[in-house]
Amino acid sequence: MPTYLGFLRAINLGAKRKFPKDAIRASVEQAGFTDVATYINTGNIRFTTAMRSRARIEAALEEAFLADRGFEVRTIVYSAAEFARIGEDAASLADPATVRHYVMLLKDEPDAEAVATLEALAKNGHRVVVRNRAVHLLLGSQWREGMTDPLGLDRRLDGVVTSRNVTVVSALAQQWC
C-alpha cells in the first residue's frame, strides 16, 4: 500500500484547538488508515492507505478530525515520493546566505502567474522559490528575530497552506520517504 504524509493546519495554537499527536494517531487509525506515525506535536502524520485520490484521502482525514475534535482541521496530503522531492528541493536550495528557511505546504498547486508573482517578492536578500505544491521562503541576513513574514507571503498565498521549518521538512523526508 502507498505511503502518504499529512500536514494538519492550525492546531495546538490556542486553548481551543488542541490536538495532541497521540490523539491524531488514534483518529487516523480509527478512520481506517494503517502504519500511522506522528512527528512532534505540530500535526505531521505518516500513514498507508489503499486510496489513491489525494482529495478523497484529505476529505476522509478532515471528516475524522472534525468528528474527533469538534472543529475543522484542514489537512494537506502528499505521497511519500512527492514529499521526498520537497526534501530534495530544500537541500538543493541550501545556501550559506540563508538565515532561515521555511516551507509552505499547499493543498493546491499555484498557476504560473501566481508562481511568478510569488517569486518576484524577492528583496533585501530574501527569496521565494516555488516548486509544485511547496513554497520555499529563504530569509537572508536582513532577517531578524521576531520577523515573521518580511515579504508578506501569507497574504499572497491562496487556499489551504501550512508551514514547517526546513529542519522538520528534512527530517520527515529522511525518516518517512
Image (spheres, helix red, strand yellow):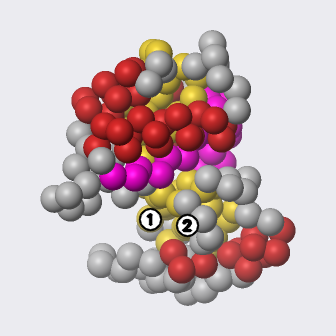
Foreground pick, 116 / 57:
57
The residue lying at 47 percent from left, 58 percent from top is: 163
Few, some or many C-alpha atoms within 10 Å of disc 2 (few <14, some 14-19, many ≥20)? many
Q: Is residue 73 above or below residue 33?
A: below
Residue ID for mark 2: 137
Tell me, yes or no, whether the highlighted magenta stretch contains residue 144. Answer: no
Q: Nearer the viewer, mark 1 or mark 2?
A: 2
* Residue 170 in sight here: no
- Residue 118 in view, yes or no: yes
Instruction: Identify which amino acid the numbered label 1 is placed on.
Output: Arg
Report whether 3 appears left or right of 143.
right
Give the percent coordinates (x, y) of residue 138. Answer: 55, 67
Toward the viewer: 83 or 15? 15
Q: Position of residue 162 (x, y in %)?
A: 48, 57
Q: Pointer 1: what residue? A: 100
Q: Kindly state the secondary structure of the residue where label 2 is placed.
A: strand
The reply to whether callout 1 and callout 2 are in contact (CB within 8 Å) is yes
Q: Which mark is residue 62?
A: none
- Whether 53 is drawn above or below 108: the answer is above
Left or right: where 12 falls relative to 175: left
Please, which residue is most extreme toward the left here?
Answer: 15
Magenta extent? 71-92
Query: Counting other residues with Cα less than 10 Å from the Cα at mark 1, is it few (<14), some (14-19), or many (20 or more)?
Result: some
Outermost right residue: 112
The spot of residue 74 in percent (x, y) is 47, 52
Please give the name of the residue rendered at 30% of the width and 78% of the height, measured from the top-left corner: 146
